[in-house]
Image (tube, rainbow, N blue to C red):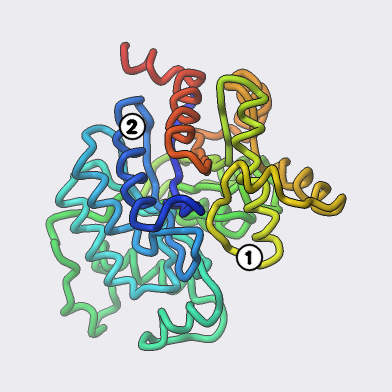
Amino acid sequence: MTPLSILDLSVVTTGTKPAAALRNSIDLAKHADKLGYARYWLAEHHSLSSVASPAPDIMIGQIAAVTSQIRVGSGGVMLPNHAPLVIAERFKMLEALFPGRIDLGLGRAPGTDQATAHALRRRLDVREGDDFLERLQELTLWETREFPPGHPYNNVVAMPDDAPLPPIFLLGSSDYSSELAAQVGMGFAFAHHFASYDAIAALTGYRRAFQPSRWRRAPHAILAVAAVVAETDAEAERQASSMDLNRLLRSRGQYLPLPSIEEALAYPYSERDRALIARDREKLFVGSAATVMAALQPMIEASHADEVMVITATFDHEARKRSYSLLAEAFGLGNRAAA
């Protein structure tokens, strides 16, 4: 079976404050480690009342310290928000502390609105347009030490210098990052849960165009999806109602904490609202484990994904843990651990 991983946004709910959401992430990671999940990635978002964690590198250290097997990484660090040297230092440090268990996922978007993005970067060298490729090149140069002769950075060392950068994955929701990841020979994770671009085209295109590099000898494609799993289809639908309303409100620019099931069921939906929710359900897998696997497996096979990464947001933390437990059983994680 395909390896299974988790993407976590440390979701804030109307009943869970941000500090509690961060502690829930640590609890969920320990649960995933016992279940046999391959990776646990943390996202970077800023100034959003629905997401508690703006600093995945801090959460990575906390989670790696209380787990033993699972890889822990960023899904991702938003490269435009940070000086490449800072990212190199922090992730080399994490790799030194937890060797062989850290991943560095990189995104192109700011993970926030324009005003917050400006506040994050106002003391950096702000460039017009998209400078992601330039920043990516500089980040890799801190590892290869191949700055041109006479370059001032030749006298700067990213410490700790005896720890390598962790494996790098480029994150994307279009063909841009898939093509770039293939060209530079890095891993690639596709965000099906909010993408308008076709996941199968992105992942197969990446694999077809992949060029081996010092970063990775063979392609590694991750399919990231949103899912809510419960013992029955009816209970999964009930749990997913919170995500349905949350996504509807986000489409209106309202990035609010995840509502309760009761709030979601009592909401006065219009016919247009219900149509939008039905459309968004194309990016959300809901049901029993058997129902979700029946819908998800064809996409895994068609995209030739090497790994599936799942984001689950439910109002109740125990329901989220149960969803991941049921998925782990469906993917045969317990069988692999026993073997």
Picture coordinates of residue 187 (x, y %)?
Answer: 45, 47
Q: Residues within 10 Å of mark 2 (few under 14, many from 20)?
A: some
> Where does the image place residue 268, in percent across and percent down from the top left?
77, 52
> What amino acid is found at the position of numbered circle 2 in the picture?
His
Residue 264 picture location, percent across and down: 66, 46
Q: Quadrant of residue 162?
A: bottom left
Can residue 249 be seen in the rendering of this structure?
yes
Which residue, given by chain and number where applicable, does mark 1 sit on?
Answer: 254
**What number of labels is visible?**
2
Tell me if 301 is positioned left or right of 103 in this view: right
Residue at image point 41% right, 87% down:
122
SS for tag 2?
helix
Q: Residue at x 24, y 44 (%)?
A: 64
Please name the residue shown 26% across and 62% down the image: 143
- Find residue 205 and report its image quarter: top right
Can you see residue 214?
no
Instruction: From the image, tell me which residue sits under label 2.
Output: 31
Question: Which is nearer the eye, 268 or 208?
Answer: 268
* Residue 142, percent from left and from top: 26, 67
Does label 2 or label 1 sit earlier along the sequence?
2
